[in-house]
Amino acid sequence: MQVGARVLKTGFAIVFALFLAELLNLPSPVFAGIAAIFAIQPSIYRSYLTIIEQLQGNFIGATIAVLFGLIFGHHTVTIGLAAIIVIAIMLKFKLNSSMSLALVTVVAIMVYEGEDFLEFGIIRFITVMVGVFAAFLVNLVFIPPRYEIKLFKMIDSLQDDIIRWTRLAARQASEHTSTKIALNKFHSRLTDIEKMYDFYKEERHYSKKKRFIQARKLVMYRQMIITTKKSLELLHRLNKHENEIANLPVPFRTMIQERLDFLLTFHEQLLLKFTGKLKPEHSKWVDEEDDKHADVMEHLIQQISFEQNREGEEEFSSYHLFYIFSRLLDYEENLEHLDTLIVSFRSYHSTEKNTDLEQDFY
């Protein structure tokens, strides 16, 4: 069983919330611990937003609870009606994420039937907010998230698998069903990468220089994700039309394989370049392949013309070739754009080092 940073932070937040509540001599400190569970978030920025929303939500919940308790009493039906009103208000103001804790506040206040009900309601509201603030402080200082490292690891791992399967598919060496299963898993991993990108995007820096560097990195990571998507689309087409590719003339099929190998190797080296393992100017070697690119397009046109003159079902091969080569060209264009972004970043921020990123890879 693997215990992650968020699990540890949740435990520390509960302990810290209970400790603060007892330190302040607040009755029923357990509600501070409950609030800490709801308030813990995966990023500091989201934790900050949670404080704002929880403050609003719990204020609404406490206000409705006190009003209903003073006017209608503490009957169980009254508590249910108060909860319905709170839900309606929370939905109106789009405070869905803090709705659960607001309802806990309603119940925690309205179950009390003493004469000092108003004072009790205020104290219970403060107790809940102590738990929210405790969770924020723990999130701020305990195990700060390193989303950039996680993001690049996920991109690098997924791209490595896609490249491996693409090389097999280009040579008709992969089993069709196995490739299809792998594609489904790749799409799921790509969704996780986009979520991690959002977490990294939410990180905030106080230094203007750091904010500028992060803005440029966000552009690069966004392009990395787009390029990975293009490589995944290409793999999907290779798997879908593997029979048509297998029936192509050997020289033409070999040329496709060589072009794919060239682009996949280029992609691998771009990731090396991003981690500082490759010289930025190394991308000049791509220019030497321009003539080969023109040859590929010329042979493609010739092959399509040849296929159109053939009879029977095989004439549809030209249609499928258009699909494959459109994905191939799209992939190549995005690789070149990614190369430009990486070279530009490495050239203008050569002194900016991410030691963890550069040491953890290759």
Image (cartoon, helix red, strand yellow):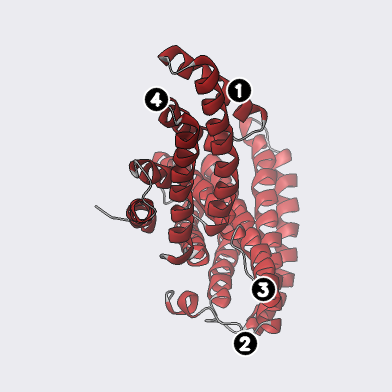
Q: Is residue 291 left or right of residue 238?
A: right
Amino acid type at image mark 2:
Thr
The percent position of residue 233, horizontal first and vertical second, equals 59, 47
Q: Name the secondary structure under disc 1.
A: helix
Which of label 4 and label 3 is nearer to you? 4
Residue 308, quarter of picture: top right
**Distance CA(mark 4)–CA(mark 3):** 53 Å
**Which residue has dot 4 on it?**
111
Residue 299, quarter of picture: bottom right
**Which residue has dot 2 on it?**
351
Which of label 2 and label 4 is nearer to you? 4
- Residue 88, labelled with which disc? 1
Q: Say whether disc 1 or disc 4 marks the residue closer to the N-terminus.
A: 1
**Distance CA(mark 3)–CA(mark 1):** 43 Å
**Which residue has dot 3 on it?**
213
Residue at the (48%, 53%) spot, across then down: 133
Which of label 1 and label 4 is nearer to you? 4
**Distance CA(mark 2)–CA(mark 1):** 54 Å
**Distance CA(mark 2)–CA(mark 4):** 61 Å
Amino acid type at image mark 4:
Val
